[in-house]
Image (cartoon, grey):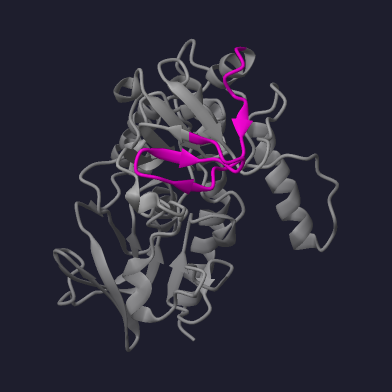
Amino acid sequence: MSSAGTNATPLDVLVIGGGQAGLATAYYLRRAGLKYQVLDAAAGPGGAWSHGWESLRLFSPSSWSSLPGWPMPTKPGVDYPTRDDVVEYLTAYERRYQFPIERPVTALAVNALEGGMEVVTDRGLHRAKMIVSATGTWSHPFIPEYPGRSDFVGLQMHSAHYESPKRFAGKRVIVVGGGNSGAQIMAEISLVADATWVTVAEPLFLPDDVDGRVLFQRATDRWKAQREGRAVDAPIGGLGDIVAIPSVRAARARGALNSRRPFEAFSAQGVRWSDGEYEQIDAVIWCTGFRPALDHLLSLGVVEADGRVAVENNRSIRQPRLWLMGYGDWTGAASATIVGVTRTAREMVGQIQQALQPV
């Protein structure tokens, strides 16, 4: 292994994670001339996108869904790129820049050494002066606790493992979650199943002419305002609100996206609603989000009670040789999106360069 602990010339930076956040970081590390390597647990390129459901689409056109240095190619007749379009792009992006990526390698633990850091993996030890953790959230799906959930004998599936509506045809299905994944999955499940959409509150649909471009601009305006210490009168609507892509608009038009407030408890065969009604169901699809995948950092003692790492400008407060990238707004505004990851990666690598300078 080129970055094993026995190396005479250690790496400047070791990036853990080869998805969009890891690739954007690698681009700027390469441009900065730093000695680096990327470790990725997946067998191939694509990051979390390779696990998306078959019909998954981005919220923005390809021109607004690109990593630094090379725009995502536009395909004729495709307004919003598909899951496969994104995986194809990320694969070509890796090939274009010839990033030093080793896979599949799973990071098990990160330890602090004198003057550097050590990463314990399932394929040996790796050392570097600095570590960038960019493992994302896909491997940590979140399912809320409900009374009796473990007693339910039907199928429970998180959106992380959902592929298509085929296996749900003719079944009684509850889709839980009021975000974009819930809306997109409900839109197609409702075509083949007796489906109920459960959301905590009435889902908020953005105007039909609002997509990821507008949302990113709003996030940028808020980010700039925060940095300048001023308030911004931004329109209602953020990255968590539902973008009306064509499939969602069609489902809404046929009345399939009317939601119901959460049920109270499970039984073996179904759920009990707040009005006392009992309903038999066959399956639940949990579109309830993710948590940061940070188990490899537990050995450092930097993971807080909320499951995050306390950071300042992406740098761990407890361990200054550790940087975090792409887990959500707490690691950079919109940094968990393709369109938003560039700005944060560029600034973070500039800060890493400064931190590596001799005192």
The answer to whether residue 271 is left or right of residue 250 is left
How many numbered circles are shown? 0
Q: Position of residue 123 (x, y in %)?
A: 13, 64
Q: Quadrant of the N terminus?
A: bottom left
State the residue at coordinates (64%, 29%).
211
Q: Is residue 286 visible?
A: no
> Where does the image place residue 122, in percent across and percent down from the top left?
16, 64
- Residue at 78% across / 55% down in the picture? 225
Q: Quadrant of residue 152?
A: top left
Between 122 and 89, the one nearer to me in the picture: 122
Q: Work out whether residue 104 or residue 195 is closer to the camera in this orientation and state it.
A: 195
Q: Which residues are magenta?
A: 254-278
Q: Is residue 33 magenta?
A: no
Residue 352: where, in percent of width, then height? Answer: 48, 69
Write down the quadrant of residue 52 in the picture: top left
For the point 49% across and 76% down, the residue is 355
Residue 284 in view of the camera: yes
Which of these two is toward me, 189 or 13?
Answer: 189
179 sits left or right of 323 in the view: right
Q: Is residue 47 above or below residue 104?
A: above
Is-magenta flag for residue 261? Answer: yes
